[in-house]
Image: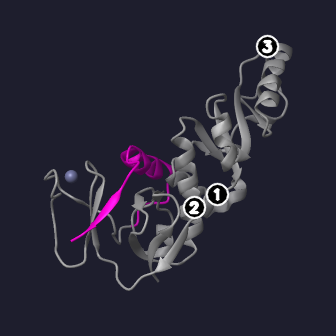
Amino acid sequence: MKLAYARGPPVAVFAGSWRCTSSPIDGVPIALGEPFGDCGVEVARLISIATTVRLAKQMGIKVYVSAELGEEGLDAAFAGGADGVLEELSFSRNEYVEGVKFVVLDGRDVADIVNTVRSLGERFRKPFDVLVATSYEFVPRFASLVDGVVITGGWVDVEVAPVEFIPEVGRCVHCGVDYLMYSGSLKRCIYCGRRLLRVVTATKTPRSRAVYRSVYKKFANITTLRFKIV
Ligand SMILES: [Zn+2]
């Protein structure tokens, strides 16, 4: 079904190209309101996961997810820039266990978390990184205090809606403008003259974390996007 990104944050991250015949590459930002491809509607969930991870990353912390998301959910999380999967780390939960690299704390209360961390430091006298397992809505509370978070829920709402037509979409990464070519055809940005990148393609990149990571990095500094009809 031809779909547009209809409701959610101003910039989302696309994920789920494997469920599309044409779409952006996984990890590519899409603008609110923009038509993005021919996909199954279930890509909304994948876009939501990728977008939530990206928004958390923008707070300057490491972001992990749980294998409970399933294979597609994990791929979406990596498209959004996730740093890893909890179950693949050497970790213990709410306690320090000899040799672990990460201690994962559950909780919503900042004072509880930092006091627990200090007391584990006192008792064990070993280095470890602290991750807080929490819902996305509480991430801002912890972003300046701990090494990272494990997002356990609260995924941002993303809705997609059917559209009649998917135009060619050319992006100027420099200006943060997407040109939706309903009538005209452009090769270069009308503001800065740079070549436009094609956003919607039939290209399928391999479902590999390394590929997701490199695509994510390429677009990580795009925080605003607007589109222009040409
Ligand atoms: Zn430009």
**Distance of label 3 from label 2 (alpha carbons):** 40 Å
Mark 3 Cα-neighbour bin, 10 Å: few <14, some 14–19, many ≥20: few
The quadrant the C terminus occupies is bottom left
In the shown orientation, is residue 84 left or right of residue 67?
A: left
- Magenta run includes residue 226: yes
Alpha carbon of mark 2 to alpha carbon of mark 1: how far? 6 Å
Q: Any mark on residue 109, and which?
A: none
Q: Which residue is mark 2?
A: 48
Crowdedness near tag 2: few (<14), some (14–19) or many (≥20) residues, C-alpha within 10 Å: many
Magenta stretch in the rendered image: 204-230
Residue 202: horizontal and vertical position, in percent?
35, 72
Q: What percent of the width, then of the height, locates residue 210?
A: 47, 48
Label 2 with label 1: CB-CB less than 8 Å: yes
Query: Does the residue at mark 3 contact the one at mark 2 (Cβ under 8 Å)?
Result: no
> Which of pointers 3 and 1 lies earlier in the amino acid sequence?
3
Furthest toward the bottom, the residue is 164
* Residue ID at (71%, 19%): 127
**In terms of sequence position, does the residue under pointer 2 or pointer 1 come before the other?**
2
Query: What's under tag 1, amino acid-wise?
Result: Trp
Q: Residue at x 39, y 73 (%)?
A: 35
| Mark number displayed over residue 125 | 3
Q: Which residue is mark 1?
A: 155
Residue 137 colored in magenta in the image: no
Identity of the residue drawn at 41% across and 45% down = 220
Please name the colour scheme applied to the rendered image: one colour
